[in-house]
């Protein structure tokens, strides 16, 4: 199991549109068989900064996600909304170590 | 609902001890009534860097966590293991917006 934290800073006038596009991506992504979580969180003291907390069963599930129509639509829709390039940080999971807890 | 991401960098010789103490804290924390998640993840390309992804129902549940015996034990146990002060980053939750999805 793998977690990728995607850090995104959007332009101030793009907060609403970015949220809408990312919620749509969330709704489809959580239906992928290999997806464990797809949380969207927003910095409490700076609404232009988001983190997407993506957990997948395997590397191949991460790869499959990047070929889905909803991911590709999101990627293209939000490209112009970003104030700087988004950053993905890859983590191994220590706990919960049981898949059923995800 | 609130997420706090706790970023911790430990001394290289403290990785195992830090993991053990934090797994113990995880096991007790997920039993708190107001806890939604308490994930421990470790940077794929640097095992000294951890993130704890804590989700709670409310501010008061976050406050209660900080008074528990398991949190206080963890805080004191790991204090000397850190290579630099830990950093907590507070987020609001966009999705999942339903509590049952946490």
Image (cartoon, coloured by chain):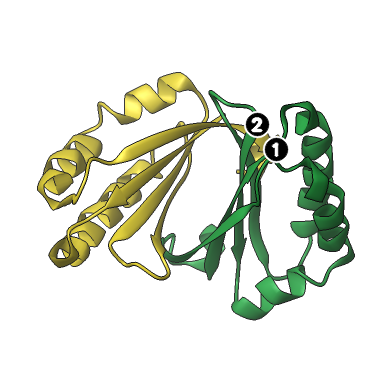
Chain colours: A green, B yellow
Mark 1 or 2, nearer chain start: 1
- What subunit carries mark 1? A
The alpha-carbon separation of the residues under discs 1 and 2 comes to 5 Å
Quarter of the image where one finds residue B42? bottom left
Q: Nearer the viewer, residue B1 or B15?
A: B15
Q: Which residue sits at x=81%, y=72%?
A: A67
Question: Disc 1 vs disc 2: Cβ atoms closer than 8 Å?
Answer: yes
> How many other residues sit within 10 Å of disc 2, few (<14), some (14-19) or many (≥20)?
many
Q: Which residue sits at x=78%, y=45%?
A: A22
Say whether residue A4 is left or right of residue A23. Answer: left
Q: Nearer the viewer, residue B25 or A9?
A: A9
Which residue has dot 2 on it?
Answer: A48
> How many other residues sit within 10 Å of disc 1, few (<14), some (14-19) or many (≥20)?
many
Say whether residue B101 is left or right of residue A14. Answer: left
- What subunit carries mark 2? A
Say whether residue A67 is left or right of residue B30. Answer: right
Which residue has dot 1 on it?
Answer: A10
| B48 relative to B36, above or below | below
Q: Which residue sits at x=14%, y=43%?
A: B79
Labelled disc at residue B38 = none
Q: Secondary structure at mark 1?
A: loop
Quarter of the image where one finds residue A94? bottom left
Say whether residue A6 is left or right of residue A70. Answer: left
Quarter of the image where one finds residue B16? bottom left
């Amino acid at each position: 199991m793998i977690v990728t934290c995607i850090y995104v800073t959007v332009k101030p006038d793009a907060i609403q549109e970015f949220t809408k596009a990312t919620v749509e991506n969330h709704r489809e992504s959580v239906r992928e068989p290999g997806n464990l979580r797809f949380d969207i969180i927003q910095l409490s003291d700076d609404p232009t900064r988001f983190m997407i907390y993506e957990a997948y069963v395997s590397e191949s599930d991460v790869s499959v996600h990047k070929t889905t129509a909803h991911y590709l639509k999101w990627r293209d829709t939000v490209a112009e909304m970003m104030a700087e390039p988004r950053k993905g940080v890859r983590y191994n999971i220590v706990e919960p170590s049981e898949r059923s807890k995800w």
